[in-house]
Every structure is written in structure tokens, then in C-alpha cells.
Amino acid sequence: MSGQKRLPPWHEKFRLQDGRELLIRPIRHEDAAPIRGGFLLLEPEQIRRRFLTTMAELPAEQAARLCSPDPRSEFALVAAEPLPPGEALVGAVARARVLDGARHAEYAILVSRFIVGQGVGRHLMRRLVKWARSRKLEQLHGEVLDDNQPMLQLVRSLGFRVLPAHDAPGLARVVLDLGTAAGKAGEPDLVPAR
């Protein structure tokens, strides 16, 4: 590399369609305060779609837990301003968690309205798929509200199956089988975003 500083693992620059640049990186405990502050900027519909309920604020304990993933079973990335953790505004969070030693992980993504529709959700989803594959997991899945068409369209485009949730009307279970040809449709490109 000609004079460019190499970024640590799971760190990459991401240029939004409007020209702004974000840093995709693993979440850190210092991100808890900016995430709580940014939560207040979310629209009630965004909160409902991500948390499947409404809430006025993100409790400090929940933010601290989100920002301290267990490296043995969890992985979380943020899309943030290219500033030090704790100072950077966080525009998106993506997380995957292996369930009790299983061969599958549950994912969740939240993208702020200030950067939605600019490819961040797709990029983060591909990173979660890459992480799940690196862990040799068999499946990545999540629960999505039936009316969250942007997320349902995104996961379908990446090869996820959309199934009715068993005990929850209004929810869909989305599943990516990582070992199948359909699951490979969600294979992340390894070319850094520009």
C-alpha cells in the first residue's frame, strides 16, 4: 500500500451515496453514550421496527450491554463518523448473536433516518453474513415486522427466506441458510466500499 495506513480488522471506510464518509467498525463500550443520544433522534416507527415495541429512550443498561458484546458469541458493528469512539455520532448498528452454542445466529440492524436508503443496511448485513460464515454457522436469522418492507426487500435480495413467525402475528422470520447455494447469494463482496 502506498503510504495509506491499513485499518484494523472489521474496520473500513464507507462512502454514502450523498458523499459523506462513515467508518464501519466494531462497536465499543464508549459508543453507549452516543447511541443513547442518537436514540432520541429516531422516529417512533424506526424504534418499533427494530425493537418490536415502542420506547421513549434506550435505557443505560441496555446501551451498555449492546456496546459490550461477548466475543465468544456476539458480533456488533457500527457505522459512525470517522472520529474516536465516544465522540462519533453513530448512524447505524448491526449485531449478530449465536444462541446458546447453536450453529445459528440471530441478527438485528438499526439504521438512522439520516442515512437510510444509502446502502448502509445492505453493507452491514453483508458483514454479518461474512462474520457468520467465518464462525462456520449454518444459519443467520431474524424477526422482522410484516410491514417493514424495506428490510424484507433487503433480506430477500440477499437470499434470505421469509417465513411466517410461529407464535407472533405480524412478524416474519427471515432465514439465510449459509451452507446452501441460496445462502451464497448473500456472499459479501470483499472489495472495500469507496
Image: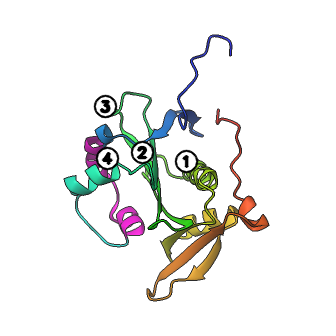
Q: Residues within 10 Å of mark 4 (few under 14, many from 20)?
A: many
Tell me the residue that label 2 is attached to.
91
Name the residue at the top extreme. Answer: 3
Residue 87: numbered disc? 3
- How far separated are the C-alphas under marks 4 and 2? 8 Å
- How far separated are the C-alphas under marks 4 and 1? 17 Å
Amino acid type at mark 2:
Gly
**Residue contact at pointers 3 and 1, CB within 8 angstroms:** no
Residue at 21% from the left image edge and 57% from the top image edge = 59
Q: Which residues are magenta?
A: 32-51
Amino acid type at mark 1:
Val
Residue at 68% from the left image edge and 61% from the top image edge = 158
* Disc 3, SS: loop
* Disc 1, SS: helix
Q: Residues within 10 Å of mark 2 (few under 14, many from 20)?
A: many
- How far separated are the C-alphas under marks 4 and 3? 11 Å
Amino acid type at mark 4:
Ile
| The quadrant where residue 149 appears | bottom right
Tell me the residue that label 1 is attached to.
120
Q: Which tag, 4 or 2, sits closer to the chain's start? A: 4
Camera-side residue of 100 and 52: 100
Residue 35: numbered disc? 4
Q: Which tag, 4 or 1, sits closer to the chain's start? A: 4
Amino acid type at mark 3:
Glu
Q: Is residue 179 left or right of residue 127?
A: right
**Residue contact at pointers 4 and 1, CB within 8 angstroms:** no
